[in-house]
Amino acid sequence: MVLIPGSKNEYFEERDKLIGMDRALRRDISYIQSRSVLEKEGDEILRRIRAEEAESIWKEDHLDVPHPFPGMEFLTGKKVIEKTRIFKIISQMPKGALLHVHMPAVVEPRTLLGLALKERSMYVCVPTRLTPTNLSSTLPIFLPLPVDSRPSIGTSISSSDYISNTWVHIAKARETFDRALGGPKGFDDWVVGALTINAREAYKTHNTVTKIWKKFKSTFSVAVGLSSASSVLHEYFRAFFVASINDGISYVELRIDPVFAKGILGEDGKRYLTQREVVFMFGESIREVKQELKKEGCEDKFLGARLIYCSVKKVAPKDLYVAVEDSILTWPIPGYDLVGQEDALRPIIDYLEPLLYFRKRQAEEQVEIPFLFHAGETLGDGTAVEDNIYDAILLGTKRIGHGFSLVKHPKLLQICRERKILLEVCPISNEVLRLTSSMPMHPLPCILNNGVPVALSCDDPSVFGNFGVTYDFYQVLVASEINGLTTLGTLARDSIEFSMMPLEEKTEALRIWEVKWNVFLQQIVNLYGLLATKH
Ligand SMILES: O=c1[nH]cnc2c1ncn2[C@@H]1O[C@H](CO)[C@@H](O)[C@H]1O
């Protein structure tokens, strides 16, 4: 029989004990117990503002956003989020590392388009001439063309004499874009629409995982073409680093498919870059950005970036051996992953043989390329692809990309906690890709309460519009009352801790982060503390 405490005092003692036991596994607990007076005050401020804004902002109707709520659908609520003080505060937070983002889905679509428009080799074609009727359902096909296959003439892709699938230079296509389609601005909007998912698509026309992935995949085909010229790609990397740094991110790991890396046309327009050259260019972009920061005296804002290799799970298992050798050839790379729409593609188990061979080759070559597998990005329960989580763990994955379905498996939660397998959780991606309809329904609180290490990431920000990681942090903070400032700090610390930086670099990154964290806490207290003037 359960003994119910007799007095009110005893009851509350027992109550505190029970809550304490329930929260004991959380990774933020030890930080909460040992946090400074400053952090405690910062946390109280954040909680106070969150509560105020839950009333003042999230219960009011906004233009085009009726019935909002904290953690609501991101694509509808984004403008409201941006109005909040919580958003402003989080945007100043030192975020640590960004561990889960895909090429080429990380830079503002208009920035990418701007870069591509200046590129001599960049051409566009469409399967049939564009008209007001087919515009929104027609995808542009972009490709940098080698010098000797560039057409000398070209009509407008919207004129009546346009011949299907013929190449027109991107700048010309834009200039000559039919007035009835909006002229050059119409061209830009058309391309941006093809690179992004909008609220109507996510929440109306494509409101299931299968439908939204159809649109999602098509954004990649457009982005790949636009970014496959060497000078575009170089600027693309830089733009990504700069935007990340401005969001308080100090280190990134970017997933790239070697098949993409093999299709980059060189500046001479004659040959394609080798993978090594692409990796070198990536390194160059890092060095350039670092140098610029150094000139401004803030080099500690950016510690660097690494490329994680990944293959899409549509490749035939026998062809994965090529990716294995590619990865070994371009070592040091910090990890290897298998990506793509989990529900529609092969399960990891199909690749068991090449993956075991990968392990063997690493031992032979004395290199270490840890697995950082996507797994559990599905609503399935016990389906062949949902079993990916078992295989990811058995194959020794160091982190799990998404792990959305992990909460269905108590034993795996325990294993991830005990073996410290971090989940790269991408809340907004999961919501836009329709695994959850809003943040309060996301399984993250369950993962955090189970003490599984987590880092937040934005996955494909150019498609979802969640650039940096502020938006994802925001959605997490407002959707749980347990989460507070110390939770955000723990997530950021773990993103560094579980990054693939070598130990020395990591120690330095953590040291720098702690300094910045304290500056951030002080800022919150100065700006929003009870003694500060009202804002
Ligand atoms: O959330 C995701 N889950 C699985 N695969 C993804 C996700 N986001 C992007 N990609 C896949 O990664 C490749 C480029 O690296 C693309 O094939 C894209 O479909």
Image (spheres, grey):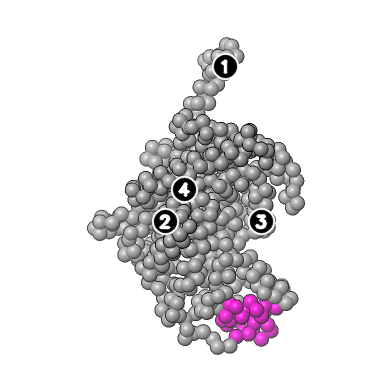
Amino acid carrying mark 4 in the image: Gly
496 or 373: which is nearer to us?
Answer: 496
Magenta-colored segment: predominant secondary structure:
loop
Identify residue for label 4: 96
434 or 532: which is nearer to us?
Answer: 532
Identify residue for label 2: 304
Amino acid carrying mark 3 in the image: Ala
In percent of width and height, residue 306 lies at 40, 57
Amino acid carrying mark 2 in the image: Gly
Q: First in sequence: mark 4 or mark 1?
A: 1
Amino acid carrying mark 1 in the image: Tyr
In percent of width and height, residue 209 lies at 58, 54
Identify residue for label 1: 11
Image depth: mark 4 or mark 3 in front? 4
Mark carried by residue 199: 3
| C-alpha separation, residue under disc 2 versus residue under disc 3 | 34 Å
Res 64 visible: yes
Image depth: mark 2 or mark 3 in front? 2
Image depth: mark 1 or mark 2 in front? 2
Q: Does the residue tagged 2 have its C-beta within 8 Å of any atom of ligand 1?
A: no
Instruction: Determine which quarter of the picture holds residue 59.
Output: top right
Instruction: Determine which quarter of the picture holds residue 413.
Output: top left
Q: Residue at x 47, y 86 (%)?
A: 148
Q: Secondary structure at mark 3?
A: helix
Magenta stretch, residue numbers? 154-178
Q: Does the residue tagged 3 have its C-beta within 8 Å of any atom of ligand 1?
A: no
Task: Please say if 79 is above or below 279.
Answer: above
